[in-house]
Image: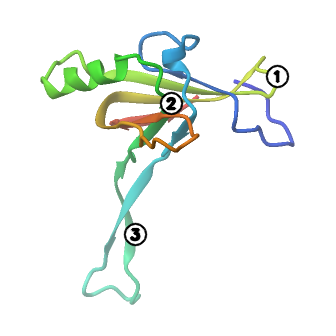
Amino acid sequence: MAELRERPYSQFNFLVDLGTGDTESPQAGFQEVSGLGMEITIAEYRNGNEKDNAARKITGTYKVPDVTLKRGVIGALDLYEWLDQVRSGSQNALRTITIQLLSEDRTTTAMVWKLTNARPMKYTGPALNGKGTDVAVEELVLACERIELA
């Protein structure tokens, strides 16, 4: 992990490992990652004989939001094949995904997000338009059970 610095890191240098160890091939070249986070639920509770009229806050379970990956269509079937494994009920379909934020010169890793027991839950193909000039982009939404920062 990189050292603490006064200026925030830029968001445009990052690596995605889909649990295969590959961060260099075109299949690992994602344009966007969104949804990294965690939310802890809080329950409110108050005894009827409580002297204070305010409820207590009790820490509950945590939730991990869905993480979305976007990349240009390159003709690879790896995302579909993984989604198909999940659809077929394969026990080997769960993966540990890592996302690394790199420094501007790509020499140090600033942060690493580790998504445990991740599986694809939604695939969206590109919007196609005969008069369009944009790159065809596919989207994969992942559900995971835990996110850790390193």
Q: Is residue 71 left or right of residue 107?
A: left
Tell me the kind of residue under disc 2.
Arg
> How far is mark 2 from mark 1, CA to CA?
22 Å
Quarter-of-image position of residue 101: top right
Report the colour scheme: rainbow
Q: Is residue 100 above or below residue 7?
A: above
Residue sticking out furthest to the right: 6
Q: Is residue 60 above or below residue 141?
A: below
Q: Residue at x 38, y 74 (%)?
A: 56
Q: Is residue 36 left or right of residue 103?
A: left
- Choose mark 2 or mark 3, whichever is in front: 2
Helix, strand or loop at disc 2?
strand
Mark found first going from the N terminus, 2 or 1: 2
Helix, strand or loop at disc 1?
loop
Residue 124 position within the rendered picture, expressed as x and y whole percent measured from the top left:
35, 39
For the C terminus, which image quadrant?
top right
Q: Residue at x 43, y 20 (%)?
A: 18
Helix, strand or loop at disc 3?
strand
Mark found first going from the N terminus, 2 or 3: 3
User: Disc 2 vs disc 3: Cβ atoms closer than 8 Å?
Assistant: no
The residue wearing badge 1 is 105
Residue 143 position within the rendered picture, expressed as x and y whole percent measured from the top left:
33, 38
Q: Which mark is residue 57?
A: 3
For the N terminus, which image quadrant?
top right
Q: Is residue 34 above or below residue 54?
A: above
- Choose mark 1 or mark 3, whichever is in front: 1
Tell me the kind of residue under disc 1.
Asp
Tell me the kind of residue under disc 3.
Lys
User: Disc 1 vs disc 3: Cβ atoms closer than 8 Å?
Assistant: no
The residue wearing badge 2 is 71
